[in-house]
Amino acid sequence: MTAFEFKRKVNLTFALTLALLIGTAFIYSPTLYAASESVQSGSYQTALICFAAALAFGLGAISAGIAISNVGSAAMGAISEKPEIASNALIFIGLSEGLVVFGFITALMILGTV
């Protein structure tokens, strides 16, 4: 596969994903809008709670991505030199993936107060 074909496939995948997200938004937005009209208008405190939950999950996901990129690249380098430490490297990658789980649990606990 040439670099041009690879870029074309990546761009096509990105375009299809974007089209799917926009299509889903158009399909489900009328029902979500109709459901939100029946609920009383939210307060400023509810908005801050939802923002805090989104921030907890978002920062957890971003930090896990950064950790996995650093730990994963170091682990692959170490495995290439010494293949018998692959199980130890996998444990460290799993530990960094736990940041997403902690962020998700924190977001659920924050949303539980709503």
Image (cartoon, rainbow, N blue to C red):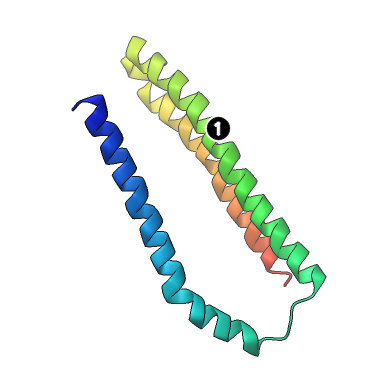
Is 87 placed above or below 110 here? Answer: above
Q: Name the residue at the bottom extreme.
A: 38
- In the image, is residue 48 above or below residue 100? below
The residue sitting at 54% across, 79% down in the picture is: 32
Q: Where is residue 44 in the image (x, y as percent from the top left)?
A: 81, 70
Identify which residue, 21 or 45, lies in the foreground. 21
Count the labels in the image.
1
In the displayed orientation, state which residue is furthest to the top: 81
Residue beneath the point at 57% across and 85% down:
35
Residue 4 in view in this figure: yes
Mark 1, residues whose alpha carbon is within 10 Å: few (<14), some, or many (≥20)?
few
Q: Where does the C terminus fall, quadrant-wise?
A: bottom right
Where residue 60 appears, as percent x and y from the top left, is 61, 45
The answer to whether residue 20 is above or below residue 72 is below
In the rendered view, tell whether residue 87 sits above or below residue 39: above
- Residue name at image x 45 percent, y 26 percent: 72
Work out whether residue 92 or residue 68 is closer to the camera in this orientation and state it. Answer: 68
Quadrant of residue 77 in the image?
top left
Frontmost residue, 49 versus 85: 49
Q: Tag 1, which secondary structure?
A: helix
Based on the displayed image, in which of its 4 quarters is residue 73 positioned?
Answer: top left
What residue does disc 1 label? 66
9 sits left or right of 23 in the view = left
- Nearest to the observer: residue 113 or residue 35: 35
Residue 88 location, quadrant: top left
Q: In this image, 89 relative to 111: left or right? A: left
Give the percent coordinates (x, y) of residue 76.
Answer: 38, 20
Task: Indicate the amino acid at tag 1.
Answer: Ile
Residue drawn 50% across and 80% down? 30
Q: Is residue 82 visible?
A: no
Residue 78 % position (x, y) = 41, 14
